[in-house]
Image: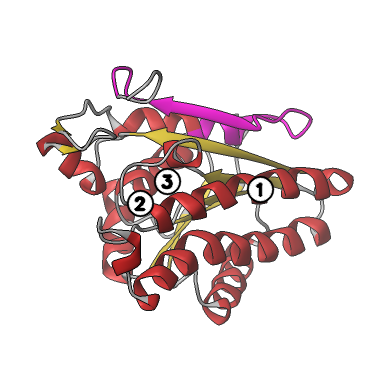
Amino acid sequence: MNASQNKVALVTGAGTGIGKAAAKALLKGGFHVVLTGRNLDRLQKAITDIGGNDSNCLAVACDVGKLEDVKALFAALKSKFGRIDVLFNNAGMGAPAIPMEELTHEQFMNVVNANLCGAFFCSQEAIRMMKSQTPQGGRIINNGSISAHAPRPMSAPYTLTKHAITGLTKSIALDGRPFNIACGQIDIGNAATEMTERMANGIMQADQSIKVEPRMDVTHVGEAVLHMAQLPLESNILSMTIMATKMPFVGRG
């Protein structure tokens, strides 16, 4: 029997891209998977695409930036599966790539709510369940980004939220210790998804030039998340960077 058999994982932003790839890997690894995002039809299609069914997957529409939605999400998860073993905080978005002084309050707050508040609210609810369930504990995996280390031009809202995710990860890792709750962060660079299509067509560099950047198969990201999720709770990957080998991150410019 797979070591992850009957364990339950929740993936936010699971309808497409990295979230969908992670959900597929977790399902293949023996987890029951709850997929959440704002579009229920897309989530249900994702379940079909990854080979899931009503017994091992659940789709729940949720805007993770809204606390009442998150509470309803976890109530649905508990009703269906009874516990949570892994939370992958993946949902997120960026703002338009324009000078930061031109961003509206709404554009800024949309990014903060999705990327930061959503991860915080979901972690709160997961920790409550993990503390109270038997056996106690679980694992939270936060999707940081290469932007948790270095920004792209005109990416202030996205970059600041991803730096904040690093602080959230370390705080949960510290506060979760007495309750067998582990927390780690995966920083992903240029996975081939809809979100990174512009990189294949050319994207602004630090010197203001436009260059095509290499991307990597998103399947590798899903497998990395599964590796983190399958570790026994006595072990934790606090930080992992997975990136397209030749993307312009290491070095100057």
Sequence-first tag of 1 and 2? 2
Residue kind at label 3, given as amino acid type? Ala
Nearer to us of marks 1 and 2 is: 2
* SS assignment at label 3: helix
The reply to whether discs 3 and 1 touch (Cβ–Cβ < 8 Å) is no
Give the numbered dot on residue 155. 2
In the picture of the structure, the residue carrying the numbered disc 1 is 167
Residue kind at label 2, given as amino acid type? Ser
Q: Callout 1 environment at 10 Å: few (<14), some (14 to 19), or many (20+)?
A: few
In this rendering, does residue 133 appear at all?
yes
Sequence-first tag of 3 and 1? 3
Q: What stretch is highlighted in magenta?
A: 225-247
In this rendering, does residue 55 appear at all?
no
Sequence-first tag of 3 and 2? 3
Q: In which quarter of the image is residue 245?
A: top left
In the picture of the structure, the residue carrying the numbered disc 3 is 23
Q: Which residue is drawn at 53% across and 65% down?
A: 118
Q: Where is residue 181 in the image (x, y as percent from the top left)?
A: 76, 46
Q: Where is residue 34 in the image (x, y as percent from the top left)?
A: 49, 58
* SS assignment at label 2: loop
